[in-house]
Amino acid sequence: MTISRVDAIPGGATWTNWARTEVATPAAVVRPRSADDVSRVVRAAVDAGRRVKAVGSGHSFTGVAVTDGVHVRLDQLTRRLDVYDGGLVTVGAGWPLHELGPALAAHGLAMSNLGDIDVQTISGAVGTGTHGTGGGFGGISDQIRGLQLVLADGSVVEVSADVDPDLFQSARVGLGAFGVVTAVTLQCEPLYALHAVEAPMPLAEVLDGVDELVAANDHFEFYWFPHTQRTLTKRNNRVSPGTPLAPLGRVRSYVDDELLSNTLFEGLNRLATLAPRVVPSLNAVSARALSAREFTDVSYRVFASSRTVRFRESEWAMPRAAMPHVLREIDAWVQRSGERLPFPVEVRFGAADEPWLSTANGRETAWIAVHQYHRMDHRRYFAAVQSILTAYEGRPHWGKMHTLAAADLAARYPRFADAMKVRDRVDPDRVFGNAYLERVFSG
């Protein structure tokens, strides 16, 4: 790639995110293969008066990757995978998580925690604060020990807790506002397996015993089905090295994860769109259809699930102790509102972590994620959940739908102002800005 090619790549092609909530028509699209390529792209874009936004898999529901300038697609930044002593691994920013898991396993390594969707690139997951669950574990950004960034002046820098720590802490969950992430250094651990137990449980029993459930399991989460008092609980616990694997059989995996969770669920949501009045009955069916199961497999195969039904999502982080009160308020709103909600509500847990803009920064956290089928109107439901959560110090997931602005968010993050000072230092002209960042970061 040369500098001249930046302007030669045709623009005008429409980009849409996975959820179809955001659309962009960039002036140019580039697929760099190295940090030096990215540097040349950024310098050329600045010379041409264009802004730059990196984009991964497009799985964010917000406009974090939207631009009318230069779209930097990171899918070619996948060649680098350097393994060091002590489980440190540096990977190119474009690695999709679903490919990174097996690649690390080939070296006898694994990430300590993952989310339940693995189509994101590692840089996209870092940029928006993707997390998994587990009371003793932070999100993906908490596993980062170093970042390689291309800054707005085109310089390539390496940052860590020891080298420009303020930029490091800002960019660990940086929304692409501090530079283009071109490589990530992760603290991995020896490859391990998880014993998974999934079982139904009454909602009241879960809420009354949630502290014990989180403490007793390495990775605990649950799904509540609105219009019912039913949940599906998931307990994933580490097993001793050498424990024989007992993965789901091919038929059971297909029936549960494809036929029921995707194919049948898509059909139920289409029916709900045509006849909303049947949603409570459909949810009762869905809650019963996902029966108890138990299996043991390599960690990355257990953490993530296949998701093909398209939806909208809003997710909120809160102090963990507030979660039962919040979920009961959401349940009460659902009962009196008349809204019909065919998607389950997902509840996860995490330890307090360090990145300045992490939704778990400085506090033990619970996350509540609400969803709506893409053919149904989500606005009233999401607005109600946002109203409830703002009373409980709620922090919205940066990659999921919300309407808060910088003034609201600054009060929720102790180091927000410090992160904005770093942004002023490394990108004073807002080369990496866009409309979403103007709202959530004020400029």
Image: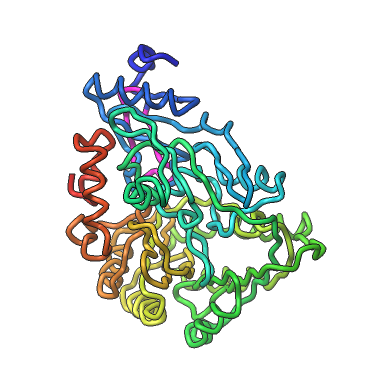
Left or right of 170 on screen, residue 134: right
Q: Which image quadrant is residue 39 in?
A: top left
Viewer-nearest residue: 60 or 273: 60
Residue range (magenta):
14-28
Q: Residue at (41%, 54%) from the top-left corner? A: 129
Magenta stretch prevailing secondary structure: loop
Where does the image place residue 305, in percent across and percent down from the top left? Answer: 60, 56
Q: Residue at (43%, 24%) from the top-left corner? A: 36
**Which residue in the rendered view is the most extreme toward the front?**
162
Q: Residue at (46%, 69%) from the top-left corner? A: 351
Where does the image place residue 370, in percent across and percent down from the top left? Answer: 41, 64
Viewer-nearest residue: 417 or 381: 417
Classify the position of the N terminus by image quarter: top left
Where does the image place residue 224, in percent across and percent down from the top left? Answer: 49, 73
Residue 24 within the magenta-colored segment of the rendering? yes
Residue 292 within the magenta-colored segment of the rendering? no
